[in-house]
Each structure stands twice: as C-alpha cells, then as structure tokens.
C-alpha cells in the first residue's frame, strides 16, 4: 500500500469516527426574552447552525469572536428554567448571559436604562395569609419571614437542591463576580439608543451595574406594588424570567449574569405604561450592551 493511499484512509477514518472529531468549544449561552432582540444578535453571529430540541431553536456560532449558543427563554419563569436547563444538558455552556427588557422599580432609573444586578430573587414565591379582624395572620407554615408582606402575600424562600443531596432554602441568586466586573468595565463604552420610531427618551439612557433584581410570573403595572418591591427588596428592576435562569445556573454551578433594559416603570410611568412605545428601543439597548459585554469576555 503506497503512502498516499494510507494517508487518505487514515484521514477518512478520522473523519468518520466521532472520537477523532474536533471537540465542541465551551460556549457562552446568550438568552433573549424578546424575539427581535434575538434576531439582532443572530444576525451578528458568524458560522450559524440551528439545532431544535423539544421545539426550542438553539443557534450556535461565533458572536464578537466568542463561541455562543443563542436561544429564546420563552415567557415567564417555567419556560425560562426549562430552556436554560435544555441548553446546559445539550451544549458545553461555560457561562450564561441573559438579555431582555423589564420594568424599572428604582426611582433613580428611567426608561431605556440598562441594569445588570448583582443578585436576583423570586419575589412572587409567596404564602397567601388568612384575613382576620386585626389584619392578616402570620403564615401557618412556621417559616421565617425575611421580607415584609404585601397585604396577604408573604414572600417565601425557595428550596434549592444541594450538591450532596437534600436542599437549601434561599432568596437571592448571585451573579458571577467576575462577570459583574466585566460589565462594569464595558459599561462606559456602550452607546445606547435614545430614540425609537415613535418617540425619544427625555434623557440619555445609561448602564447601571449592581444592586438587586426580582422576577415573578406577573407583568407589573401598579405603582403601589412597584414601590413595595423597591422598599422590600431594594429591587432596581422587575421581570418575569431572570431569577429562574439564575436559579438553574446556581444549581448547575454555571456562571451567570443578567442584563435588563427598562421598557417601562412598572406602574410608575408618568401617564400610561410606556412598554408599547419603548419595547423595541429597550430591547435594542439590551442587545447592544450584551454584544459589548461578550466582546469584553476573556477568550
């Protein structure tokens, strides 16, 4: 057998044998809550390949020079947890970056601003207490009440599996400190949009890193509840998915950070809720921030 034929056979065998295939690179999972935002990120991704798992479309490729897997979370907590775990089960995910819009709860922030909290909580995990002549009774579950109630709704800690078995109870899920540090580094370098097709913001938006965010299966457009969320949890932003993703990341030991651009003020808007007017601008600002963030990640 001549040398050329031998080399051809070896090359063909290596190609056919998955054991000799190039290993899948560790990827950054970039999760979007809003379809147009995902499409913008996909358009900026090179070498795209789509994989459908249980109806969820995952796009792999390279964004800002980094290997990524992009997908939609689905609306609300259960969908977000499900799609995140699917990604972790089927792709070599190194870190998770969530990009979406939310309602502002911090009175120092305004529509268009982008927030990257250091921690996220599932604030609508609650016990509904019994009404009495003297107000609402304490929960009969005998649990600690680490936060004030909103009427009958008493916030509860959530049960989290422990690596060695059993469970832990906690409220906050922390963003990765190194990812928060990267967010602070790139924040000043991002130029955010100020005008949408229908209107412009009253002032230039900014990126704010730090503080708290909370998530629950409710779209909030109520001034009293917004004020409660800021007072009780010091929440800067309210949304419907990020804390669920942070919960899954924590259980899997995967680094996580979430970015939310404010599309409205969760009931604190000056007149009507601004979500229909500024949803696309907010999504664009979140996507711009995430692209700059991914570009700033270490190789």
Image: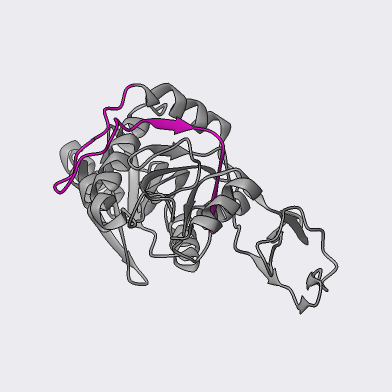
Range covered by the magenta-colored residues = 189-215
Instruction: Check if residue 216 falls in the magenta segment.
Output: no
The quarter of the image holding the N terminus is top left
Farthest residue to the left: give it: 197
Instruction: Check if residue 209 falls in the magenta segment.
Output: yes
- Estimate the x, y position of residue 56 in percent, counting from the top left: 34, 66
Judge whether residue 231 can be spotted in this image: yes
- Estimate the x, y position of residue 71 in percent, counting from the top left: 33, 56
Observer-nearest of 54 and 171: 171
Q: Height in image: 223 above or below 182?
A: below
Judge whether residue 1 can be spotted in this image: no
- Estimate the x, y position of residue 139 in percent, counting from the top left: 79, 70
Q: Height in image: 73 above or below 42?
A: below
Q: Residue at x 38, y 24 (%)?
A: 186
Number of numbered discs overlaid on the protein picture: 0
The quarter of the image holding the C terminus is top left
Q: In this view, does 114 lie to the left or right of 123?
A: left
């Amino acid at each position: 057998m001549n040398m050329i034929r031998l080399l051809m056979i070896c090359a063909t065998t290596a190609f056919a044998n998955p054991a000799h295939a190039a290993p899948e690179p560790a990827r950054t999972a970039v999760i979007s809550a809003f379809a147009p935002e995902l499409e913008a990120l996909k358009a900026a991704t090179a070498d795209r390949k789509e994989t459908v798992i249980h109806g969820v479309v995952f796009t792999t490729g390279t964004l800002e020079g980094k290997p990524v897997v992009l997908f939609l979370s689905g609306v609300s907590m259960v969908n977000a947890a499900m799609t995140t775990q699917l990604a972790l089960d089927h792709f070599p995910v190194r870190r998770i970056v969530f990009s979406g819009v939310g309602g502002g709860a911090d009175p120092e922030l305004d529509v268009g601003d982008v927030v990257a909290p250091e921690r996220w909580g599932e604030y609508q995990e609650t016990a509904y207490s019994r009404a009495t002549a003297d107000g609402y009774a304490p929960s009969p579950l005998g649990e600690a009440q680490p936060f004030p109630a909103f009427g009958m709704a008493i916030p509860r800690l959530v049960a989290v599996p422990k690596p060695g078995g059993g469970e832990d109870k906690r409220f906050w899920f922390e963003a990765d400190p190194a990812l928060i540090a990267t967010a602070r580094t790139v924040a000043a370098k991002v130029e955010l949009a100020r005008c949408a097709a229908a209107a412009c913001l009253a002032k230039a938006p900014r990126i704010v890193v730090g503080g708290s965010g909370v998530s629950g299966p409710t779209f909030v457009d109520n001034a009293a509840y917004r004020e409660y969320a800021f007072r009780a949890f010091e929440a800067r932003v309210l949304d419907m998915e990020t804390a669920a993703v942070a919960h899954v990341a924590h259980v899997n030991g995967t680094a996580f950070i979430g970015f939310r651009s404010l599309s409205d003020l969760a009931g604190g808007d000056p007149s009507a809720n601004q979500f229909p007017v500024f949803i696309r601008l907010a999504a664009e600002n979140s996507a711009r921030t995430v692209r700059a963030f991914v570009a700033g990640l270490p190789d």
